[in-house]
Image (cartoon, grey):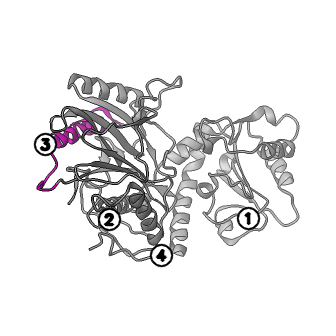
């Protein structure tokens, strides 16, 4: 029977039924929301986010923040600063202004004043051009620093087009350009700050990701000696399509085989070719995530294809998985605390792995409004990048993405990589999984 038989298609997803944040608590599907209710829910979240924005702007010294959305070239920020609706205007502009004692002003300079926009923004009267409104705002509030989506290291922080930049520059007039600054620090805090209302829905998304992968790595989908890597990938595409959710990257599968020569790509085990047939005795791995409600999951799990006569994976493979569990525990519960530098967490974790004689790699990254989100990554890059260390932010979501490499006696001492990835959230006691981690390999009979 399908693990996803409970899903109602193609309307929407699930959320978790329990309001408890106890790690490992049961996560069950609830009634699925129609699209209109998804929009309503996200607008409720948006109101909460706007309520935090003024404090963030002041913390980063930003007096005015301007987001320019171009038709056919949408700014990736738009769905997170405005209602997540289709915007088809030639150029739609969203402006946030620190109005001093009057608080935060929010203006939408769009082709028409749609009702959903009026809930969140002031809409200028008919006949006034966006350039005129921008100039008036600047003259009235005289912001010392005007933040724009430029100069950032990630796409979402450098999304302003050249023509959009010139438009803002000309609208604000001579001297304004000297006050332009990169909105990168503000964007990062805004997108890396999770709100409590998202938590249960996100946990439900993680549970759904888990259920999809368990079915993909089962005898219901994989027939040893017949099913190819491409077959499993196409099954995953079709499954998310039938459920009415999306995926933000191509599902990748990797295969390790006794006596096989594993190829590498950028230092990692390479993705298997779609034509590769999955055989008995293979150790298979998937990297997969779903997109829903403006949020994204990222999930890596492993399965062993039983040989004839086997009832479990070889002890050597199970010991390799246990090494990865040790790495998870050290990173999540021993090294990580709110406020600690991600680089320090990486260094402490790797030091302990070397002391335990475990060959380990850590490449964990923030999750949330992007799959590869903004914020503090805990990886080999965070310890070497020439930039200020980033502190871990309590409440943030992360993909605990890592691996260990262990010689397996049953495979003649061949080294096997056990790669795991689980969404987690940061508490005062360290990172906590949204759903329990993989304690044993999935078995395909």
CA separation in Å, label 2 and label 3:
25 Å
Which residue position is annotated with label 3? 315
Q: Compared with residue 5, is residue 161 higher up or lower down, i.e. above or below? A: above
Compare residues 118 and 194 and report the one nearer the observer. 194
Is tag 4's residue or tag 3's residue first in the polypeptide sequence?
Answer: 4
CA separation in Å, label 4 and label 3:
43 Å
Is tag 2's residue or tag 3's residue first in the polypeptide sequence?
Answer: 2
Mark 2 lies on a secondary structure that is loop
- Marks 3,1: beta carbons within 8 A: no
Which residue position is annotated with label 2? 221
Q: Where, quadrant-wise, is the N terminus in this rendering?
A: bottom left
Question: Dot 3: few (<14), some (14–19), or many (≥20) neighbours within 10 Å?
Answer: few
CA separation in Å, label 4 and label 1:
24 Å
Mark 4 lies on a secondary structure that is loop
Mark 1 lies on a secondary structure that is loop
Is tag 2's residue or tag 1's residue first in the polypeptide sequence?
Answer: 1
Which residue position is annotated with label 4? 11
Q: Where, quadrant-wise, is the C terminus in this rendering?
A: bottom left
- Residue drawn at x 62%, y 52% is 76
Which residue position is annotated with label 1? 88
């Amino acid at each position: 029977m399908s693990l996803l038989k409970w899903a109602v298609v193609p309307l929407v997803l699930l959320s978790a039924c329990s309001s408890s944040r106890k790690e490992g608590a049961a996560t069950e599907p609830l009634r699925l929301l129609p699209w209109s209710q998804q929009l309503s829910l996200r607008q409720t979240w948006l109101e909460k986010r706007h309520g935090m924005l003024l404090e963030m702007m002041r913390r980063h010294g930003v007096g005015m923040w301007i987001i320019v959305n171009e038709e056919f070239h949408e700014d990736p920020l738009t769905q997170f600063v405005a209602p997540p609706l289709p915007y088809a205007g030639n150029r739609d502009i969203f402006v946030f202004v620190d109005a001093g004692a009057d608080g935060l002003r929010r203006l939408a300079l769009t082709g028409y004043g749609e009702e959903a926009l009026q809930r969140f923004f002031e809409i200028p009267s008919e006949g006034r051009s966006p350039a005129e409104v921008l100039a008036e705002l600047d003259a009235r509030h005289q912001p010392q620093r005007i933040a724009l989506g430029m100069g950032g290291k990630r796409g979402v922080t450098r999304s302003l087009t050249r023509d959009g930049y010139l438009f803002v520059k000309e609208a604000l007039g001579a001297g304004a350009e000297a006050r332009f600054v990169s909105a990168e620090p503000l964007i990062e805090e805004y997108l890396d700050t999770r709100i409590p209302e998202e938590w249960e829905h996100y946990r439900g998304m993680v549970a759904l990701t888990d259920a999809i992968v368990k079915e993909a790595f089962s005898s219901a989908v994989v027939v040893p000696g017949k099913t190819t890597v491409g077959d499993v990938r196409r099954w995953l595409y079709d499954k998310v399509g039938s459920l009415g959710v999306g995926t933000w990257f191509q599902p990748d599968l990797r295969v390790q085989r006794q006596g096989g020569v594993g190829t590498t790509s950028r230092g990692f085990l390479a993705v298997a070719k779609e034509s590769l047939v999955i055989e008995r005795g293979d150790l298979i791995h998937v990297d997969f995530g779903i997109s829903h409600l403006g949020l994204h999951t990222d999930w890596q799990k492993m399965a062993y294809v039983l040989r004839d006569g086997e009832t479990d994976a070889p002890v050597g493979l199970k010991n390799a998985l246990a090494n990865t569990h040790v790495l998870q525990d050290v990173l999540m519960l021993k090294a990580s605390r709110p406020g600690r530098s991600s680089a320090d967490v990486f260094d402490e974790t790797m030091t302990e792995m070397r002391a335990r004689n475990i060959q380990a790699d850590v490449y964990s990254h923030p999750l949330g409004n992007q799959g590869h989100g903004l914020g503090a990554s805990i990886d080999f890059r965070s310890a070497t990048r020439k930039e200020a260390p980033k502190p871990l932010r309590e409440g943030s979501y992360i993909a605990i993405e890592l691996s260990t490499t262990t010689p397996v006696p049953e495979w003649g001492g061949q080294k096997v990589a056990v790669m795991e990835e689980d969404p987690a959230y940061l508490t005062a006691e360290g990172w906590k999984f949204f759903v329990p981690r993989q304690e044993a390999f999935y078995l395909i009979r």
